[in-house]
Amino acid sequence: DREAEEEQANKESRRQAKMADRRLSKAATIGTALMVVNSHRAMILIVAIVGILPLIYCALDNGGTNGASRNSVKVLQENNILIQNENELSCLYLETTISAWMASLVNSNVNT
């Protein structure tokens, strides 16, 4: 009778071990599936960033260009239009304006 109980306990432990093995193999399959799904999500996110973000910038006013350079050129053009005389003082003023504008493009120190 005792041997039969031990035999029954051994069968039960073997059955539980087999079930545990099956659960582990399913867990590995689930982990692989989750990794694949996460990689697909990452690829979709990268495509969205690379493909859609430039379209958003293009939809902005002036195509998303730097407004500081546009304003700088606009001020230079206004200075050129403002000066109508062709005397020495006007030419010196325009030369100084262009030199300051070019210096502002090269570095932040305009007083050079």
Image (spheres, grey):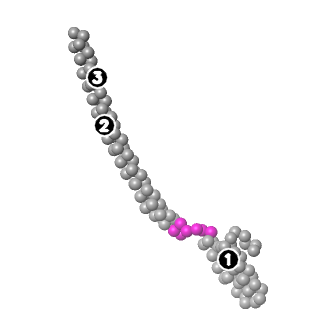
Report the front residue among 80 and 6. Answer: 6
Name the quadrant containing residue 23. Answer: top left
Which mark lies nearer to you, 2 or 3? 3
- Tag 1 near tag 3, CB within 8 Å: no
Distance of mark 2 from mark 1, alpha carbons? Answer: 69 Å
Q: Main secondary structure of the magenta part?
A: helix
Report the front residue among 22 and 55. Answer: 22
Residue 35 in percent (x, y) is at: 37, 46
The residue that mark 1 highlights is: 102
Task: Identify the residue shown where x is 64% and y is 79%.
Answer: 77
Crowding at dot 1, Cα within 10 Å, few <14 / some 14-19 / many 20+, comes out as: few
Direction from residue 22 to residue 43 in the image, left or right: right
Name the quadrant containing residue 45. Answer: bottom left
Q: Quadrant of the C terminus?
A: bottom right
Amino acid type, label 3: Ser
Task: Identify the residue shown where x is 58% and y is 68%.
Answer: 66
Element at label 3: helix
Q: Is residue 23 above or below residue 91?
A: above
Residue 2 in percent (x, y) is at: 24, 10
Which mark lies nearer to you, 2 or 1? 2
The residue that mark 3 highlights is: 13
The residue positioned farthest toward the top in the image shown: 1
Q: Over which residues does the magenta segment extend?
A: 61-68
Element at label 2: helix
